[in-house]
Amino acid sequence: MEGVCVLGAGSTKYGKLADSIADITTQASVAAIKNAGIEPKEVGASYISNVFGVADKQVHIGPVLMSRLGIPDKPSLTIESACGSGSVSFREAYANIAAGFYDCLIATGVEKVTHTGTEWTTTYFAYCSDFFYEGQSGASFPGLFASMARAYLTEFGATEEDFAKVAVKNHDNGALNPKAHMQKRITVDDVMNSAVVASPLKLYDCCPFSDGASSVVLCSEKFAKEHGGDYVKVIGSGRGGSPAALQGRDHMTTIPSTKIASEAAYKMAGVTAKDIDFAEVHDCFTIAEVVDTEDLGFFDKGQGIQAVREERTRLNSDISINPSGGLKSKGHPIGATGIGQVVEMYDQLTGNAGRRSVKDAKLGMTHNFGATGASCAVHIFESA
Amino acid sequence: MSVEEQVIENARQGKLLTHKCADCRYLHLSTAYYCRQCGSEDFEDVLVDGKGTVATYTIITVAPAGFEKYTPYAFVIMKLDGVDLRISGFMEGIATPDDLPVGTPAKITGFDERGILIQRQ
């Protein structure tokens, strides 16, 4: 199997964007291509992650991107795996390089939904649930994670203020990220006093709906070495699944797909949770980050909340969780998120993360899931 | 009748149709076509009483389209009595967590445009 590297990365700002979905897809892709120092004609194919292209009147976006890049003859594939689309797209690109089908590819994720308004997005996002059992009964995504949060509060003696500290921490990190949707610090009181969306989760427990696009250039290690620019190595890749509906899971406070995907990635990389210096985890809601850090093996079950209280997940503490600001503060353009996490890996491991740099970072992890974790992919990156 | 129509018809009677694996006895909701534990597609239909206790829930104030007029309402995951199965559904008239402590006895009471309906017993 070929060694696979990330040779370049680029993103639009995340937030409420005016440009069209085709425009922002192209902007991020061009940024990644230029950052890698390659020409579009060296790109063998593209993997696009997107969920709601229909909202901006553009599905089958791959050929549009390739046409704009001057390589209309090159193939593309659009991949949907709800909020986990980006990491699945990255995995497919990774697998195609590893298998030797291509020397160089781009993986670009995009979402453009904010113009549709809160009701549309709340409604359509609910279509990512097991609709017959969940969406049909009025479950929203905040509602499904709120159900996990209620179970966690009951089982482990956590408080709503504890969850709020996750939001505060991620906003502190996001304030250092010029691409973040919400570049402002908040307090526990701000979270506690924000409007209830789905009890016990309040507005500031939830990530925002965001527009945005992110792109990375993947290549074989041979291509990267011959090329000569900065690159990072992909040393672990794993995917997993969970029962689609929460009701089908034995425990409401764990996400099985995260465990399956991370165990596969750790095994492939030959490392353990203790070796990871920083991680971009799927914190669509504050409860999710707590559950993620337990399921990924950073903390024992029920101890993730204590780690938050002790500030062990802050930037440059025991393990830097979501140095980018995470979905919570950087924003969550759902098709782009998983690729955006890889952009953060590239920036951190090549020394280009500015004020949010993780000191002496050698090993980073991305963790991105779809829906309530019905699908998940985990990747591990090493500085070259 | 499709498997989903069967679930709906039984929910209207306060019941839940389940699939018990004929080979390993693992119990599933009736939308399962293959056994999660052993892979068998041989099931016995077992009708269970739609009664249980609240395993977890949320009270939704920002609702998807069609549900605005019902807010606040609860989305409930209920653990069924006597079997290792959970079922989720819509519960009206829940405004605060004090209205619905985890563990509250509940039951399936029907099905309409709000999906499977669950009420406190």
Image (spheres, rainbow, N blue to C red):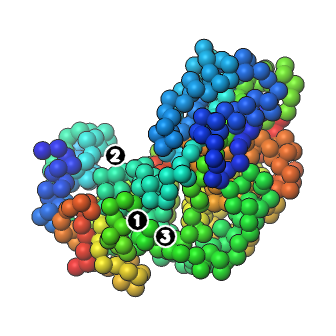
Disc number at residue B37? 2
Q: Quadrant of the N terminus of chain B?
A: top left
Pinpoint the chain carrying mark 2: B
Pinpoint the chain carrying mark 3: A
Asked whether A18 or A231 is in front, the reply is: A18
Disc 2 or disc 3, which is closer to the eye?
3
Relative height, residue A108 to residue B101 (above, below): above
Identify the residue at the far front of this view: A18
Q: Residue visible at 77% across and 62% down?
A: A175
Which SS class for mark 3?
Answer: strand
Question: Mark 1, residues whose alpha carbon is within 10 Å: few (<14), some, or many (≥20)?
Answer: many
Question: Mark 2, residues whose alpha carbon is within 10 Å: few (<14), some, or many (≥20)?
Answer: few
Which SS class for mark 1?
Answer: loop
Left-right relation of A294 to A374: right
Type of amino acid at the residue the image marks with label 3 = Val
Residue at which label 3 appears: A197
Callout 1–callout 3 Cβ contact below 8 Å? no
